[in-house]
Image (cartoon, helix red, strand yellow):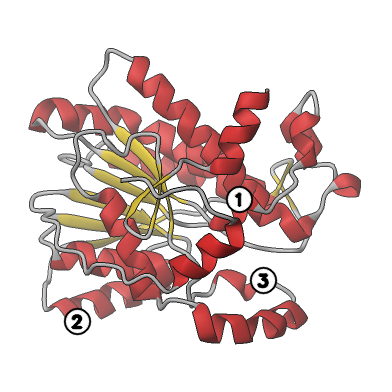
Amino acid sequence: MAEPERSYISRFFSSQFSQLPHPTQNFKDAVILVTGGNTGLGLEAARHFVRLQAATVILAVRDVQKGQKAKESIEATTKIQGVVEVWPLDLEKVQSVQDLTTKATGLPRLDVVVANAGISTSEWTLIGGMERSIQVNVLSTFLLVMSLLPKLRETATQHHARPRVVVVSSEGHETTEFPEQDADRIFDALKDKAKSNMGERYDTSKLIQLYLVRALAEHLSQSNKPAVTINAVSPGLCKTGLLRETPLAARILISPLKAVLARSAEEGSRTLVHAAGPDNGETHGKYLRDCKLLYAARKAMRRRRSC
């Protein structure tokens, strides 16, 4: 059941003190791919998936060595061997995305994709002609999702399943002004250094993700091809390494807030596992938080209606 409308600050504080249920879903036989699975939310979600009987859990990571250490950690804590695989994926490189999706065609099935990897940076950098955080958080992430759709649909047909795509979002999408949305060519505006506010770029990328989740959900719903659920989930403020590229002064400023309010990575990961759980489409195109439906992306919805 969706929660009633409240102010952003009220929702944030209430959310951070919510008690999240420990995951109990059954992922037996499922093949699950988690981007950014070597650390933080991705690692802890992968650990849950292994514990919940997934057949294969793929850690799609930029640093394979760190991925191997994550695999060893999961195997040590779950006492389950032979489930975790480590695949290279660098979202700064389109070729890396293409290589992974090509490799995925050889999988016997693909039930869940958790698009968790992302960056938060205040540094302006162009990657392949696009500002880096937009390239990683938006363009490469959705290139990956779109490229994996044929495999997800094949799984739906051959195994009578409803595959899921989970895009890890953020409550911060509510705070961005996103002036680039009024440009004739939004992505051109987003790579204009002179006009870009990198202080809110991460939140902007998360709002764009929500637009794309809703658009893709509508497209999938209108298609006569096998059903695939796509949703977005906010894990809340968590103790992870997301802010590692944020200036030291900003990290020091936010550290007291994180110390008091932030969830552990394991607690935050419960929201990802919940969003990835089997359903009949009730979360399709929706925005989830605290392991329940939220009124879908309030700011995104307001702007969508005003377009």
Of marks 2 and 1, the one in the foreground: 1
Quarter of the image for residue 298 reads: top right
Q: Are marks 1 and 3 in contact (CB under 8 Å)?
A: no
Residue at x 42%, y 32% (from the top left corner) = 146
Query: Mark 2 packing: few (<14 Cα in 10 Å), some, or many (20+)?
Result: few
Tell me the quarter of the image containing the C terminus: top right
Amino acid on which the number 1 mark rests in the picture = His
Q: Earlier in the sequence, mark 2 or mark 1?
A: 2
Residue 45 x/y as whole percent = 30, 64
At numbered mark 3, what does the secondary structure look like: helix, strand or loop?
loop
| Residue under numbered circle 2 | 77
> Can residue 299 be seen here?
yes
Amino acid on which the number 2 mark rests in the picture = Thr
At numbered mark 1, what does the secondary structure look like: helix, strand or loop?
helix
Q: Are marks 2 and 1 in contact (CB under 8 Å)?
A: no
Apparent side of residue 170 relative to residue 186 in the rendered image (left or right): left
Looking at the picture, tell me which residue is in the foreground, 275 or 247: 275
Residue 152 x/y as whole percent = 26, 33
Looking at the picture, tell me which residue is in the foreground, 294 or 285: 294
Apparent side of residue 225 relative to residue 219 in the rendered image (left or right): left
Quarter of the image for residue 157 reads: top left
Residue that sits furthest to the right in the current view? 194
CA gap between label 3 and label 2 equals 29 Å
| Residue under numbered circle 1 | 173
Residue 15 x/y as whole percent = 45, 65
Apparent side of residue 102 relative to residue 234 in the rendered image (left or right): left
| Residue under numbered circle 3 | 245
